[in-house]
Image: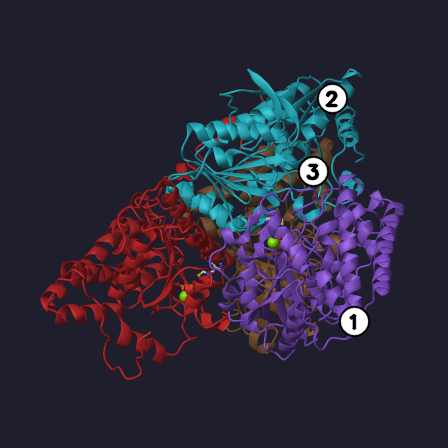
Chain colours: A brown, B cyan, C red, D purple
Amino acid sequence: MSTRITLSQAFQQGVREEMERDDAIFVLGTDMVERGGHFAQLRGIGSEFPGRVRDAPISEAAMVAAGVGAALNGLRPIVDLNFIDFALGAMDEIVNQAAKARFMWGRGVPMVIRGTAGIAFYAAQHNNSLEAGFAHTPGLLVVMPSTPADTKGLIKSALRCDDPVVFLMHKSLTGLRGEVPEGEHVVPLGEAAIRRAGDDVTVVAYGALVARAERVAERLATEGVAVEVIDLRTLFPLDLATIEASVRRTGRLVVASEAPRHGGIGGEIAAAIQESSFFYLDAPIQRVGALHTPISHSPPLIAAAIPSEEQLERAIRATLTPQEAVA
Amino acid sequence: MSTRITLSQAFQQGVREEMERDDAIFVLGTDMVERGGHFAQLRGIGSEFPGRVRDAPISEAAMVAAGVGAALNGLRPIVDLNFIDFALGAMDEIVNQAAKARFMWGRGVPMVIRGTAGIAFYAAQHNNSLEAGFAHTPGLLVVMPSTPADTKGLIKSALRCDDPVVFLMHKSLTGLRGEVPEGEHVVPLGEAAIRRAGDDVTVVAYGALVARAERVAERLATEGVAVEVIDLRTLFPLDLATIEASVRRTGRLVVASEAPRHGGIGGEIAAAIQESSFFYLDAPIQRVGALHTPISHSPPLIAAAIPSEEQLERAIRATLTPQEAVA
Amino acid sequence: MIDVSEAREPLPVSLDGLDGQDLVEWLATMQLIRDFEEALDPLCLSGRIPGGVHVAVGQEAVAVGAMRALEPGDVVTSSHRPHHHGLARGVEPNAMMAELFGRADGTGGGRCGTMHIAAMDRHYYGGNGIVGAGLGLALGAALAAQVRGSGQVALGFFGDGAVNIGRVWEAINMAAAWKLPLIAFCENNLYAVETPTASVTGGDSIVRRAEGFGLPAVQVDGQDAGAVHRVVREARERALAGEGPTFVEALTYRYQGHNTGQVTSYRTDAEVEEWKQLRDPLVRLRVALTASGLLDDDAYDALCARSRETVAAATAFADASPWPDLATADAGVTEIDPKLRGNP
Amino acid sequence: MIDVSEAREPLPVSLDGLDGQDLVEWLATMQLIRDFEEALDPLCLSGRIPGGVHVAVGQEAVAVGAMRALEPGDVVTSSHRPHHHGLARGVEPNAMMAELFGRADGTGGGRCGTMHIAAMDRHYYGGNGIVGAGLGLALGAALAAQVRGSGQVALGFFGDGAVNIGRVWEAINMAAAWKLPLIAFCENNLYAVETPTASVTGGDSIVRRAEGFGLPAVQVDGQDAGAVHRVVREARERALAGEGPTFVEALTYRYQGHNTGQVTSYRTDAEVEEWKQLRDPLVRLRVALTASGLLDDDAYDALCARSRETVAAATAFADASPWPDLATADAGVTEIDPKLRGNP
Ligand SMILES: Cc1ncc(C[n+]2csc(CCOP(=O)(O)OP(=O)(O)O)c2C)c(N)n1
Ligand SMILES: Cc1ncc(C[n+]2csc(CCOP(=O)(O)OP(=O)(O)O)c2C)c(N)n1
Ligand SMILES: [Mg+2]
Ligand SMILES: [Mg+2]
């Protein structure tokens, strides 16, 4: 059985089922009890689980700290940070406390840090791409689903994980609808999904770029180019095995992300794959990402800063006809 | 004229000369006036420049915020964060305020954020490698010198730059001695240095790994392997042009960093170089970095987590005899 | 706060010692703010303004009263609810509206949008998307003012929700310890999004909390522009006399939801009505000006007409303004052009 | 604080209602802490302990008085100056010393070192390298205690320097707003590294600052173990009665420099001598116990001998302990082994 619901509702379904299963899950964030969070993502949960959802003051550092301490003392908190940008006010708590407790003390911190991420409205300070920084932080897991079904399946896994998971939900996918299996539907952390099979070029993406890559793949299929689209889903740990297997077949790789290209997760993937699969590559790995700039308010400026379908297509074509650079 | 002084003294010399040159430079940090900062790096400056050095409360967020606001209102602050790890308590101020002001408002934030970085004692919470995150943040420049002369030359450039510069000084290099030119010695931001020329393999490193790479290069020279060692010095913007020119000669690249290898700056360099210089590469680019773990207190555990000379050597050798992976 | 349990008509305002012509300008600016902001919701809902905005309808006296107590060289920073501050500081309505529309003629050429509109030439460092962060910039401006001996003060606005952001207290402590010329200005409109701030805030008084940091803290009726003006004026004088920062808590109210189109079911109609009927800052100022003969009905009508025209003209200006040049999307991020050496 | 201007001998302590045998154990633990910590400087300088340590010589009564007011199930978090808390909580001296040496038999197998020694089985979440951060973990433990109805309280230690870290006040506000069973315990030893905290702190009283956040705040003589014990006991009772958190400021003093081998030129010899002569927590407790016949000189000497033996044994144990297994350098970072799928 499945129902067609939004990504946000799928998140809620996953949280609800886990809260029914496990009394230790506890939700903390601003405007949670009545509104269900800034994006109403948990609307209703407050009254369904009295005492297990709490409205916090605007104190991101204390929210995360409270989550860490509560996790060490028997709860499994979801700390809802609203926009993930506000994690910047709680970085010590995330990086120095949550991420390091298991290593130092042998006790995990089962906590989900939820944040709305990706590029959309509200300009520079609400459109930071922090995922690469989290993925570089030993002790954190990082998740960013692109479909409602994965959102449910991944939040269930995150809530069963004994370590801190940064759970990123893309602003522009909140209302995305899709079939979501009812009941026990669990997507393991650390496993990518092949969204579309193809033997010519591998495209790795996550978040809002997955659908964009699928559309480009569809277009290129009409020209006879078979693009394999891999949705990372989990950003740490990366599923390099799946990417590697694909690239060893296609010989070509494009990695796409909405984060500034420079220093993003695409660099890690490109570096790892060229290292492991150098002799399988028929062309340089292409990376597609945002310009090295804060995000603007004006829609055309936003669009100019982040990867378009055209840009993705150009990158794919570049792997098909690599230019011998002039020596 | 030059004198043989420590990296810390070279920093001080650069700061002193710039403070003499420019009245707007102002120093803010804990224990600055008498002690000259936690590492005595500015000892004496407090009494030499009365009113221009101030002891701050332990309030990293307010220190950086004060730096940003003061920079917008006519000062050129040095905000000394002691260990760079404490920047985690000021991330919003660094990433959302300092880094974005010029983009949003057209006015730069001439501020140096100094921090002691790199891997050494004091365990997990005092040994975060934050440089990759800063380099991924549009609006920030990032510097990490490896010699006393560069430290002087780069702090002078940083203090003349109209944008926020994160200035990282390696814990274990504080007392490193070297010849430092007196007076006007300026090292431009964004230019790498070739520490040792060679035509067989290029090694790119920064911070404490530069000297390690030089020692390995020396050893390998006895076997007839000519290693070119490039010291990045500035981590953003990267001097990809210099690396590229070198790799196009050597055909082989190793990137070394003490940060966790996964997600570090090495990934960016490897990705960019394989893209720009794919057909010049004779072997996969190797990256050497720390294990994906917080840093321990115990010296052997620290040593096991970060790149050793042996590891660097293995990586260099791997580029000399690349293994055709089994298909 | 004044006890309103017996009041049936708008409360008086305190205009002693203020210049009559100035006060008429205050009312005109407050009217402009109201008309400007009331025009925004439909513009957002129709998509002409991309995204939503936080409007401060009901909070006009705070902005005008405070801003008119400052001098042109003083520094002001704002919050995520910034239009009233910006307009009171003299940001051009045309340029503000064009910025909201995301157009080339906006204050930031379309880069900033609602929360970052600034006027650096007026020492107005703009709104801030991060609760409490504007105060930090004001802190720094005050530090520079002290170090440079520039004779400026800096005023940072923030909401009641920000009193639970730790960095706000770091800034206040630093200003108090160093006797910086800072005015920490809390617009207490009782709610943070949908959460009554009192329900998540320890203690029963924001000013008492502030006093613990060693600076004078005054609560003022934020719907009385004159009263706000007086406390800011006094705070400014203290600051310039080297006596350090002042904390101001202005009791005010936002009539609309937190953001465009948002419901307000978390508060009672009676509460909203009481603020509108008895405390509306525009009505109160108008009544006082009329009573003292400074503003007759014709003059008031003319003022309102000018305000409406200004807003209409701003909307037309914004509509006519071109989209930004896409080639500049990543220009001016830093002074050094990183592309020079191959990245990014 | 007691006025000591006329005092010429150690001040009395307040032991009313406390059990005599308990008090002897307190003194023994305080002596152990002192001997243990006094042994550390030479061990650091000779390199047997890698890096330096922050010792709390002079602050023993704070740790013992507070810890003995808690129950085994209560949660405790510490700071960068953590050995006295750890030893008072019952961390084995052998395991603590081995950890300081970086050896396999240390509490953290050499991973933690001085600032992160913990005893999770004793609900002691260890020291913290980040000023003020321990309080945040205690906050969370108190939240879990409240939600789970576990009957625990949580106590978080921090220094006077931490009162200017914003997150400390975020935590205190949250605890006050939610009436959490938290004891926020400030060890005020007057200095943060070399900076007199008063010189960078607005207001003239830490407890007054705390009161502004809506919780009771008490100042106590931190060199009087009995007095510390009483305020923590009372705070614990309040917490368990659902009345919420308490802020405690204990006035204390560190005799040595901030970190191993550091100078103390920022304070006068007279100040140090006054604390040592009139307020030393061990001397004061011993004098009281002797006067009340609970401890004669022989028993005291035996207690001191045991303490010295314990420290000597711990040092020998640490010396004999092997280095950690290098193959585990990156083990147990997360429950999922990322290597499974090819990274990192
Ligand atoms: C650090 C941070 N946390 C959360 C938010 C999301 N947010 C925006 S406005 C707001 C409420 C602010 O309330 P208040 O300070 O009272 O200002 P008001 O909206 O009432 O003017 C919140 C939670 C934010 N922008 N920044
Ligand atoms: C957030 C942060 N900033 C700075 C430091 C560096 N530091 C370590 S201890 C210390 C002084 C702390 O003073 P106090 O809180 O009074 O504790 P005490 O050392 O007196 O016990 C400082 C500044 C730190 N560890 N964490
Ligand atoms: Mg409010
Ligand atoms: Mg102290």
Question: Given this view, does label 3 or label 1 mark the residue nearer the observer?
Answer: 1
The image quarter containing residue A113 is: bottom right
Q: Which labelled disc corresponds to residue C22?
A: none
Whether residues under marks 1 and 2 lie with C-beta atoms below 8 angstroms apart, the answer is: no
User: What secondary structure is marked by label 2?
Assistant: helix
Please report the residue visible at 50 percent of the width from the left and 51 percent of the height from the top: D199
Q: CA distance from mark 3 to mark 2?
A: 27 Å
User: What secondary structure is marked by label 1?
Assistant: helix
In the figure, D100 relative to B22: above or below? below
Q: What residue type is disc 1 on?
A: Asp
Please report the residue visible at 35 percent of the width from the left and 55 percent of the height from the top: C49
In the figure, D182 relative to C134: above or below? below
Question: Given this view, does label 1 or label 2 mark the residue nearer the observer?
Answer: 1
Few, some or many residues within 10 Å of mark 2 (<14, 14–19, 20+): many
Q: CA distance from mark 3 to mark 1?
A: 64 Å
Residue A315 at what x, y percent from top left? 56, 37
Q: What residue type is disc 3 on?
A: Ile
